[in-house]
Amino acid sequence: MTDKKHSKASPPIGAMPEGEARDTRGRRIRYDGDPEHLVRGTTDADRADPHPLYVVWEITLRCDLGCKHCGSRAGKARSHEMSTEECLEVVRQLAEMRVREVTLIGGEAYLREDWDVIARAITDAGMVCGMTTGARNLDADRVRRAVDAGLRSISVSIDGLEMTHDAQRGARGSFRAALEAAERVAASPIILAANTQINRLSMPEMPSLAELLVEIGARAWQIQITVPMGRGADRPDLILQPHDLLELFPLLVYIKQEILEPGGVQLFPGNNIGYFGPYEHLLRYGAHLGAHWGGCAAGKWCLGLEADGKIKGCPSLPSADWTGGYADKEPIAKVVAETRELRYLSERTRDDLWGFCRDCYYGDICKGGCTWTTECIVGKPGNNPYCIHRALELEKQGKRERLVKVEAAPGVPFDRGRFEIVEEPMPELAPDEAPTVLGLPLAHITGLGTSATTAWSDEAIARALDER
């Protein structure tokens, strides 16, 4: 299974023909667990003739939020963003390339006036169109326009309980606005999904978020680890440490089995949540049919487009190093087929790995996990510290890894700094020590509920979001 999903991508939605089954509330039935029933799931025919199935398209960098972890540092529109006519030509090319699904993002996609014209063209060309949004101003008129444009799904970003979310999103009231927008979407023919960044602030609040998503009628939840890119690179105390995965993965299994599955919400771990070990078959979607992580899909199954035309194998990769060409200047298919920036990742082998990953048992299949994550941490692919198998193997040796920031990001969209991976002894725990999640008692975080506003003190939130 090699579907590529990223920080701004929407959760994959199952193929849903006319006359589809619905539940007692009139909602589409959830994804049945078969990867080949996903719009962007790979089939035998795809594997015989690989081509991009899924495109994440930033149609503007303009944004109405100021998220502290935003990898693209969104806010103002780019100095040059493709015209409507150029965007419609991109749609034509994507359809010709047999792309099956396109997710529109920003910045904030709906701040571009012709966003629904682009969306309508995508659906008219036979591709599934979705949107990922912070939803601060996703009002009733914009939801109606989305319905009229034929959007299949809208994924609303929710990064914690109210105080935690608002602090990360840089706008008081953004949590309430997102929930109200989600309820509008849930009441429409569009599938409501959600996506969440997992970091030191949001991780203990994940059980409460899961309960909230069940309450508001979400059908899918994509989760991904916050990566130190863009504004996230300026806030190293927000980022999880690799050894935090030892607490994260059991928590995710609990959330999936005890909250999401009974509530009818499908969990889609992002591509920087892995890899293998005892949790792969419990968390990877389609695992009961033999699906598993199959390596970075950038440039092979997935493409990223930026508003000024940049073409990348993955929408989240640092633009300075991974732009293969420009959609308004050359054919997209030619860039995909011929440029090193697009071909390298799809052709990567164990020989391209280094560090722990080079000698890992799973190296030939995993290929170092998520390229975007590793690139933003150590500056090059092939040695990924965010790996549960790796954390468990080090724990057996009484060791753990810690990330230390050694280089600041330059302050431009899709930039990165650099971190060193420091190996150190694993602290010993007292035999009777109660389970915790990032230092908070497990019993406390599982009992927060949806009415809580945060798991943290004001001081702890400020400390995590401090720039340095």
Image (cartoon, helix red, strand yellow):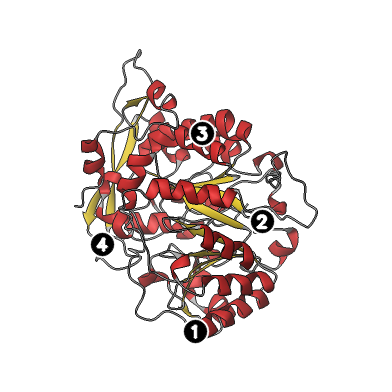
Q: Amino acid at mark 1?
A: Asp
Looking at the image, tell me whether mark 4 or mark 3 is earlier in sequence order. 3
Q: Earlier in the sequence, mark 3 or mark 1?
A: 3
Secondary structure under the numbered disc 3 in the rendered image = helix
Closer-to-camera residue (403/142): 142
Cα distance in 3D space between marks 2 and 4: 35 Å
Return the residue at label 2.
41
Q: How far, Cα to Cα, is label 4 from label 3? A: 36 Å
Secondary structure of the residue carrying tag 2 is: loop
| Mark 3 to mark 2 CA distance (whole Å) | 28 Å
* Pointer 4 residue: 409
Question: Which mark is on residue 328?
Answer: 1
**Distance of mark 1 from mark 2, alpha carbons?**
28 Å
Q: Quadrant of residue 321?
A: bottom left
Crowdedness of circle 3 by 10 Å Cα count: few (<14), some, many (20+)? some
Q: Secondary structure at mark 1?
A: loop
